[in-house]
Amino acid sequence: MLDKKLLEILACPKCKGDLEYKPEENKLICHKCKLAYRIEDDIPIMLIEEAEKIE
């Protein structure tokens, strides 16, 4: 589970938009860019080139 304070300050590195936290998938979702950023060991991997494209 990510810290609430961390979730408040995180933004999509591509568009600077809001992210939705999906704890069951362990991902942060940017609906505007249609990208999912994975979370490994409670650390968000916020690299655009490593993000997963979503529909």
Image (tube, helix red, strand yellow):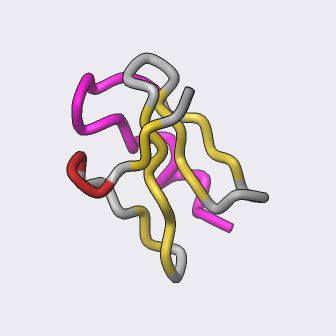
Identify the residue shown where x is 43% and y is 17%: 32
**Position of 27 compared to 16: left or right?**
right
Identify the residue shown where x is 24% and y is 46%: 48
Front residue of 44 and 34: 34
For residue 1, above or below residue 12: below
- Quarter of the image containing the C terminus? top right
Front residue of 7 and 43: 43
Residue 24 placed where, x, y %? 78, 58
Q: Which residues are magenta?
A: 1-18
**Position of 42 compared to 24: left or right?**
left
- Quarter of the image containing the N terminus? bottom right
Residue 29 placed where, x, y %? 53, 38
For residue 31, above or below residue 45: above
**Position of 40 compared to 3: left or right?**
left
Identify the residue shown where x is 42% and y is 63%: 44
For residue 7, above or below residue 3: above
Identify the residue shown where x is 50% and y is 66%: 39
